Image (spheres, rainbow, N blue to C red):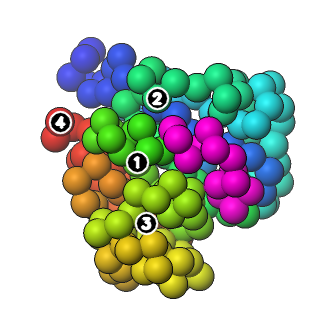
Amino acid sequence: MTDSLPLAGQKFLLFVGADYEDLELWYPKLRLEEAGAETTMAGLESNQTYLGKHGYPAESEATIESISSSDFQGVICAGGWMPDKLRRYEKVLSLLQEFHESEKLIAAICHGGWMPISAGIYQGVKVTGSPGIKDDLVNAGAIWEDAPVVVDRHFVCSRRPSDLPDFCRGILNVLLSK
């Protein structure tokens, strides 16, 4: 059974908050679980139901404040308007910095790149993201590429919901190459 569940025993963090992009949170969550991983959705409050931009509910299982990066093999930063709000919290930024220092997966799609930008971890990293944050990415020192997925070491980035199949393949490729 382990062969069919290549991520069994691994845990991944997904940030959640109001106005997250529905597909960009749920698709990677379910894909990781399909591969055997455990996922934790963390928001500013525990057991809080947040609505996505399209109205799909997601319940936080933990508070961001209670999270330790050492408990996870990676983090998913979904898009929507949520990243602009969450990047204002020091704990979000310190968690992303810790994931980066440990060379653990940091995956951001669409506007999710706002959080790694604010954490100061994109300097010299090849990325993509929503064209709406291209200038922010470039100004943060990232190397912009307009592609469905960009993988640079432990970073995986995509532009929009239609890139999700490529995004999740990129995530799995990074995780399975370690």
| Residue depth check, mark 3 versus mark 2: number of the one nearer the observer | 2
Does residue 136 appear to the left or right of 4 in the view shown?
right
Q: Quadrant of residue 64?
A: top right
Residue at x-position 37% and y-position 23%: 10
Whether the residues at callouts 4 and 1 have beta carbons within 8 Å, the answer is no
Q: Is residue 150 visible?
A: no
**Mark found first going from the N terminus, 1 or 2:** 2
| Residue depth check, mark 1 versus mark 2: number of the one nearer the observer | 2
The image quadrant where one finds the N terminus is top left
Q: Which residue is mark 1?
A: 106
Mark 3 secondary-structure assignment: strand
Does residue 62 appear to the left or right of 31 in the view shown?
right
Q: Which residue is mark 2?
A: 69
Which residues lie in the magenta part?
Answer: 83-95
**Mark found first going from the N terminus, 4 or 3:** 3
Number of residue marks: 4
Q: What is the x, y in percent for residue 143?
A: 32, 77
| Residue depth check, mark 3 versus mark 1: number of the one nearer the observer | 1
Q: Is residue 86 magenta?
A: yes
Q: What is the x, y in percent for residue 72?
A: 43, 27
Q: Amino acid at mark 1?
A: Ile
Q: Is residue 74 visible?
A: yes
Mark 3 → mark 2, Cα distance in angstroms: 23 Å
**Mark found first going from the N terminus, 3 or 1:** 1
Q: Which residue is mark 3?
A: 158
The image quadrant where one finds the C terminus is top left
Q: Amino acid at mark 3?
A: Ser
Q: Amino acid at mark 4?
A: Lys
Q: Which residue is mark 4?
A: 178
Residue at x-position 45% and y-position 72%: 140
Q: Is residue 30 above or below residue 39?
A: below
Mark 2 secondary-structure assignment: helix
